[in-house]
Image (cartoon, rainbow, N blue to C red):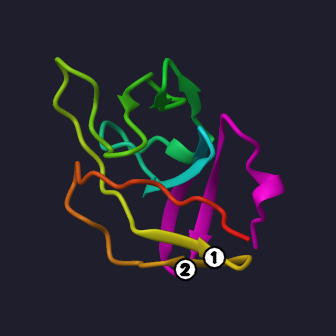
């Protein structure tokens, strides 16, 4: 179980939900969920840092934009994103990954 205090602004976390391994990042007041592994060599994206607005794989420095899982140009790598809704202190995650590179608005915590 992971709470918002476990993912301070500007950081991420490796999260296991059932059989899924995800990377959850808190950036600019929103939470973004991406596939938990870098496609380059399987690095743990949830352990990465946000550098220049990109999630950066801790193993080899590959980068992905949190809102769509795409590498910044000119690179072409992509990871899957997920739909997330946070409302009334409840988190709803659709465990079906979206196509790699799919734009998501990020979830805002509403009270």
Relative to 26, say whether 99 is above or below.
Answer: below
Does the rendering let one see residue 44?
no
Q: Which residue is mark 2?
A: 92
How dense is the environment of label 2, judged by Cα within 10 Å: few (below 14), some, or many (20 and up)? few
Q: Secondary structure at mark 1?
A: strand
Q: Spatial distance from mark 2 to mark 1, Cα to Cα?
A: 8 Å
Q: Which image quarter holds the C terminus?
A: bottom right
Across and down, in percent, residue 52 comes to 49, 17
State whether residue 95 appears in this view: yes
Residue ID at (40%, 54%): 105
Residue 106's x, y, as percent?
Answer: 47, 55
Residues at discs 2 and 1 in contact (Cβ within 8 Å)? yes
Residue under the image location 22 percent in, 35 percent down: 77
Query: Which element carries disc 2, helix, strand or loop?
Result: strand
Residue 20 x/y as whole percent: 47, 72
In depth, the one of 38 and 27 nearer the eye is 27
Q: Earlier in the sequence, mark 2 or mark 1?
A: 1
Bounds of the magenta segment: 1-24
Question: Disc 1 designates what residue?
Answer: 87
Q: Residue at x 42, y 79 (%)?
A: 94
Q: Nearer the viewer, mark 2 or mark 1?
A: 1
Label 1, residues with CA under 10 Å away: few <14, some 14-19, many ≥20 = few
């Amino acid at each position: 179980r992971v709470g918002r205090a476990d993912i301070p602004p500007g950081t991420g976390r490796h999260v296991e939900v059932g059989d899924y391994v995800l990377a959850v990042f808190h950036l600019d007041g929103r939470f973004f969920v991406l596939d938990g592994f870098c496609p380059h060599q399987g690095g743990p994206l949830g352990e990465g840092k946000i550098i220049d607005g990109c999630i950066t794989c801790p193993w080899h420095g590959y980068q992905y934009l949190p809102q769509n899982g795409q590498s910044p140009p000119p690179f072409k790598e992509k990871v899957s994103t997920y739909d997330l809704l946070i409302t009334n202190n409840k988190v709803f995650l659709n465990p079906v990954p979206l196509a790699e590179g799919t734009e998501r608005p990020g979830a805002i915590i509403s009270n």
